[in-house]
């Protein structure tokens, strides 16, 4: 097992970190705490830039947040507004009238300091970052540590979040990785979900409408349902958004997706996961390499816009003096 560090931009202090052995290779960058690539026996299981692309330019220009760690807030906050402790806050409206993924100066835009801890078959990249009220207009300043850990023996990538705030604030971090277990970036329609899914309904503006999931439950067949089955289900919400862009309640903190050869097993301490199936592609420079439904996310987080749905009981509220802790793992297994 080995790791290498390559400097991509000396002036910006952007590095590419590669962890590898004879079975797998995983790459990260401190620009937005991104996962860049993950290969299992030379098969890439995530979407991202190819070797011929300019990696920094790719991430600066692409509108799909490939591989980025998102904070302070994953998802949309309606109208960029919320009330906390009786005080009203107006955030940047960077997605129409809404705040998306913490705004245009969110964590995904930052270059972060990091340390590397190498312990036998486990390598940890420990990132350190401060999220400032003066930059993103959320209340308080947050000191945050994000660890990307890779277990080469078990082909397991783990994200560990820890944060404290100087004031009561919101914190809803997640990672925006897109998975595709096929040998190419062919459609994920053949991928199987091994869970019943209860979609939270969305308004026309893609904001979670209510906490009622009863009308858009998808029951699996014998033991699975494919993305194609869901796309063809006739659900108005699926047709409206040309696929899935919905939060889903987790039954036991796990979620499995597979094709005929590989299985992705996710485990988390979060109650919801946002599934997004890359429902449109509007990026002229890369239309040939990125296709509609060529990847899916499993974004473990609190319910987007929870502060406006649940008010003072929203799970995304981080109180001054408390410590936020959360762990999510993604493991690749071979199917027998």
Image: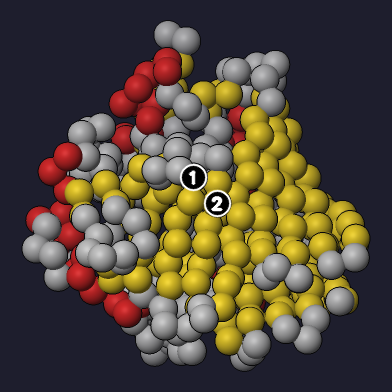
Residue 162 % position (x, y): 70, 37
| Number of other residues with Cα within 10 Å of mark 1, as a class: few under 14, some 14 to 19, many 20 or more | some
Q: CA distance from mark 2 to mark 1?
A: 6 Å
Q: Nearer the viewer, residue 58 or 25?
A: 25
Residue bearing the label numbered 1: 253
The residue positioned 11% from the left and 57% from the top of the image is 235
Label 2: which secondary element: strand
Q: Are discs 2 and 1 less than 8 Å apart at CB?
A: yes
* Image quarter (top left, top right, bottom left or bottom right) of the N terminus: bottom right
Please identify the quarter of the rendering in which residue 83 is found.
Answer: top left
Q: Nearer the viewer, residue 333 or 191?
A: 333
The residue positioned 71% from the left and 80% from the top of the image is 24
Q: Is residue 165 in sight in this rendering?
A: yes
Q: Is residue 261 above or below residue 246?
A: below
Q: Is residue 257 left or right of residue 44?
A: left
Residue 158 % position (x, y): 67, 55
Residue bearing the label numbered 2: 267
Label 1: which secondary element: loop
Please identify the quarter of the rendering in which residue 208 is found.
Answer: top left
Residue 96 % position (x, y): 30, 47
């Amino acid at each position: 097992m080995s790791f290498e560090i390559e400097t991509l931009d000396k002036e910006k202090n952007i590095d590419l970190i590669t962890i590898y052995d004879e079975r797998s290779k995983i790459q990260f960058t401190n620009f937005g705490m991104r996962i860049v690539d993950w290969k299992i026996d030379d098969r890439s299981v995530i979407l991202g830039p190819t070797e011929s692309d300019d990696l920094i330019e790719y991430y600066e220009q692409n509108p799909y947040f490939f591989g980025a760690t998102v904070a302070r807030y994953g998802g949309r906050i309606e109208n960029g507004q919320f009330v906390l402790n009786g005080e009203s806050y107006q955030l940047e409206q960077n997605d129409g009238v809404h705040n998306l993924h913490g705004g245009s100066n969110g964590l995904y835009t930052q270059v972060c300091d990091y340390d590397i801890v190498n312990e036998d078959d486990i390598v940890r990249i420990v990132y350190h970052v401060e999220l400032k009220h003066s930059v993103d207009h959320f209340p308080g300043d947050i000191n945050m540590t994000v660890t990307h850990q890779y277990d080469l023996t078990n082909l397991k990538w783990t994200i560990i979040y820890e944060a404290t705030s100087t004031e009561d604030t919101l914190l809803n971090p997640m990672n925006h990785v897109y998975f595709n277990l096929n040998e190419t970036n062919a459609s994920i329609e053949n991928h199987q979900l091994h869970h019943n899914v209860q979609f939270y309904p969305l308004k026309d503006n893609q904001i979670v409408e209510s906490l009622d999931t009863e009308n858009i439950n998808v029951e699996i067949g014998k033991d699975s349902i494919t993305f194609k089955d869901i796309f063809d289900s006739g659900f108005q919400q699926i047709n409206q958004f040309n696929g899935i862009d919905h939060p889903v309640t987790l039954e036991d903190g796990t979620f499995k997706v597979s094709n005929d050869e590989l299985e992705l097993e996710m485990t988390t301490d979060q109650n919801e996961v946002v599934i997004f199936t890359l429902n449109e592609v509007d990026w002229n420079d890369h239309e040939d390499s990125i296709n509609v439904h060529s990847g899916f996310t499993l974004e473990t987080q609190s319910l987007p816009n929870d502060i406006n749905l649940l008010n003072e009981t929203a799970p995304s509220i981080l109180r001054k003096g408390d410590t936020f802790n959360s762990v999510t793992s993604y493991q690749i297994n071979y199917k027998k």
